[in-house]
Amino acid sequence: MKRPLLLLALIPLGLWGLFALPDILAANPATFWDWRKQSIILSGILALWWMSAGMVLAARPRWLENRFGGLDKLYRLHKNIGIGAGLLVFAHWMIEWLPKNLSKLGWIAGPNRPRGPRGEPDLWLDLAKDVGEWAGYILLALVVAALIRRIPYRYFRLVHKAFGLVFLAGAFHGLMLLPASFWKQPLGWATAALAAVGVIPALLSLAGRIGRQRRYSATLESIRQQDDQVLEIVCRPSAWPGHRAGQFLFIDFGQRGEGAHPFTIASAWNAQDGTLTLAIKALGDFTATLPDRLQAGQRVVLEGPYGNFDFGASRDAPTPQVWIAGGIGVTPFLAKLDERASQPTPAADTDLFYCTRSAVGFPDRLAERCHAAGVRLHHRLTDREGPLDPAEVTACLKPGSSVWFCGPAAWGAALAQTLTGNGLPREAFHREIFEFR
């Protein structure tokens, strides 16, 4: 996570230090206003690099998804890059605006440069300045709006989609105003190339084509409302490439303005059966109203599968595992239980800690399914027994064990810190960061 952000800062800074900084130092002497001019250019270049990287990640390329360990982690990086780009745009604006206005107020000395007659106005440069100024204002407003979780998801989608248009405006502004000398050095070439790479996903986003090749039409076969506000739906896709247990998908129920929402697949893939099961907890306005909006036979659109929370599916030999689920976080483990129960080969030695506030009706026959899959179940009722003690998890760890967690983010972070601080390798703790805004 930290390395990509560091590279996005260090590479342009390094190129600037090699090719632009010597010109400043050669000035005799370099004034505050000389440094200000170069700082405006540098902050603008950094902002453009970060915005371009954010647009590339927004396109969900498979090779990057695999490189960063799943779409959930790719989106976390995308979010952090977006916040960083917003801060850089704000710094770019303040470096340009603040000294100029302080000089007008007489609080600091203005630049000491001769003022000759103005030449003919350059239409394109003036347009680039205006476009960049308004794009900066809009970008800052969009970043703030994206971070306010109280804004409903349907409005967040519209806000997020506008980033593509803002990026195109920002790229036009940055490249048009890049000094001519920069086009003769690697920093200018690299900035132009990265901006060009970002233009493609920006256009795909505006056209609604991101993820299009991974979309499949499906029919809702059955809908069942559980007692504990969990809606279990079974859908049959017309075509599906298959999925690994623990992966998730996006599903568009056709509700106007809502678009596709992510949900973990709660069933293993069986090509002969050809159905997928989703378990949806009523956690917000949209999910709470789904039971009244959906009916058997309804057409939906699936997109996926995504994610690398797959229980080490790529490993040659099984290793001991500990699974920890909180509430609806049990869904990826249900898929893995079904998969193991259907396989004749011995499964890895596994313990499942399932934590709920009280006895729940979902999932059905969990103890039986664990027994069939050869998994030891530890069901903890936290209202009665208190929160799970990490020492109980540590007691189940064996040499080569890995821990797989799906539940509340704060609990997962605290648990990871405790377990990895007590002998568990950091890379052996896996959790899905199921936050997409």
Image (tube, rainbow, N blue to C red):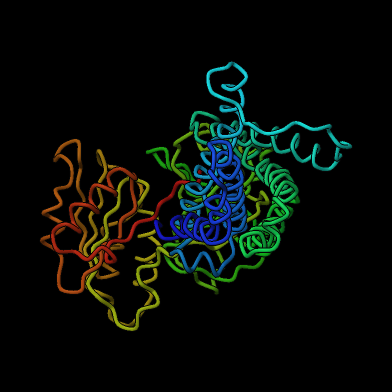
**Residue at the front extreme of this rendering:** 28
Please tell me which residue is depicted at 54% across the width and 73% down the height of the picture. Answer: 271
**Residue at the right extreme of this rendering:** 120
Please tell me which residue is depicted at 63% across the width and 63% down the height of the picture. Answer: 190
Question: Is residue 183 positioned above or below 93 on the image?
Answer: below
Question: Is residue 274 positioned above or below 56 on the image?
Answer: below
Camera-nearest residue between 244 and 158:
158
Q: Is residue 395 left or right of residue 217?
A: left
**Residue at the top extreme of this rendering:** 105
The answer to whether residue 291 is visible is no
Residue 137: x %, y % from top left: 64, 31
The number of numbered badges drawn on the structure is: 0
Camera-nearest residue between 139 and 38:
38
Quadrant in which residue 352 is drawn? bottom left
Please tell me which residue is depicted at 51% across the width and 49% down the height of the picture. Answer: 81
Question: Is residue 359 positioned above or below 299 on the image?
Answer: above
Residue 285: x %, y % from top left: 52, 31
Camera-nearest residue between 286 and 169:
169
Residue 48: x %, y % from top left: 62, 50
The answer to whether residue 130 is visible is yes
Residue 305: x %, y % from top left: 54, 63
Q: Is residue 417 left or right of residue 266?
A: left
Q: Is residue 33 left or right of residue 66?
A: right
Please tell me which residue is depicted at 40% across the width and 52% down the height of the picture. Answer: 433
Q: Quadrant of the N terminus?
A: bottom left
Quadrant in which residue 333 is drawn? bottom left
